[in-house]
Image: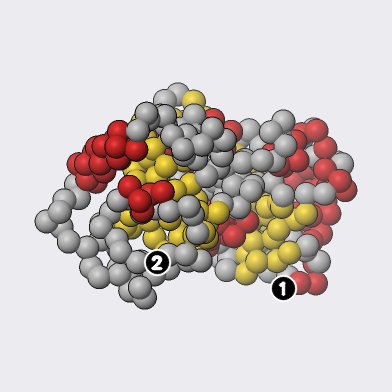
Amino acid sequence: MRVIQQLDSSELQPTQRVVCVGAFDGVHRGHQAVLSTAATVAENYEADYTVLTFEPVPVEVFSPHNSYNIRLSLKQEREQQLSKLGVDTVVVASFDDCLQQTSAYDFANQWLRERLGAQVVVVSENHTWGAGGEADIAAIKQLGAELGFAVQVVPLVNYHNQPISSSQIRHLLWTGQVSPAAQLLGRAYAVSGTVQSGEGRGHQLGFPTANLLIPEAKLVPSPGVYTGLVQGQRLGPPPVSNSNHVGWPAAISIGGSPTFTETADRRQVEVHLLDFEGDLVDATITVSFMDRLRDQHVFNTKAALKTQIAADITELRLRLKWSDEMQPPVPADR
């Protein structure tokens, strides 16, 4: 897959092109329906399967949350998902003041016709273009007719009678509902980060944790304790590997250590990998959230906290069907 930043028309070879337009934050099931349609149309036309997307994504510019903890997929993560879906070319347009103020006609003419040379443009049925979302689907079709490209409209994908949207998934994650969020995404929600040295409290309790530094823009689920699977450097072959799940079973705590400190860090992510022995400091790992175990609590004693963590891990083993008899492989690069 080719990724082009700040498109100049000279960077693209003249060819037939089927273009999907959108932010594609999360590349969720609704996005996947649009992208799948574009892939089929591109195959029928023997055309380049192209995605025109934006950086930053519009929600980072317009959201009342001031861009903090809001991205479902960072730029590289989005590109990885698009590559898995067979996209030929990704064009990343800077969502700056100039583009934000571009009219629907100028966007269609300058970007889709002149720069990309689109033969077909594929969009969802609620898509809009132009400053303030001035062009709805009817207007987009009219622009296509005027400028010489066809417009393929893809129906929205519903879940429990509601259209799937990135904002809906953000709400689920902000409230800790990682399992429903996975249903809308079509995969488990995941965060990646670098393991940092911590204060060693988990190790002292007998449950060592990897402390993750998550990029600021990336959405971190609500504070609580979760089950999950981990992949990354120094972990070796994953103990769990089947058609649905791949990774190292883990209990994940988000939101700091309320038993030890009154200062809560909503974005603090600590990961305890079951039956793993090794040093992960400075390694990059990816945590996929499977289910929520419980809220965070303040415990009166370390012993009470230790008892609860042991109960959490027992529950994790039950949920992931992981037992002491299923010995993991020896981790690589200890």
Residue found 66% across the figure and 37% down from its top: 127
Q: Is residue 294 left or right of residue 211?
A: left
Residue type, label 2: Asp
Residue type, label 1: Gln
Kindly state the secondary structure of the residue where label 1 is placed.
Answer: loop
In this picture, is 61 found above or below 4? Answer: above
Query: Could you tell me if residue 93 is visible in this image?
Result: yes
Total count of labels: 2
Residue found 78% across the figure and 62% down from its top: 6
1 or 2: mark nearer the eye: 2
Residue 34 location (% of width, % of height): 54, 46
Spatial CA span between label 1 and label 2: 48 Å
Q: Which residue is mark 1?
A: 13
Residue found 15% across the figure and 54% down from its top: 324
Packing grade of label 1 (10 A; few <14, some 14-19, many >=20) is: few
Q: Is residue 20 left or right of residue 199?
A: right
Which of the 4 image quadrants contains residue 171? top right
N-terminal-most mark, 1 or 2:
1
* Front residue (pair 228, 331): 331
Q: Which residue is mark 2?
A: 279
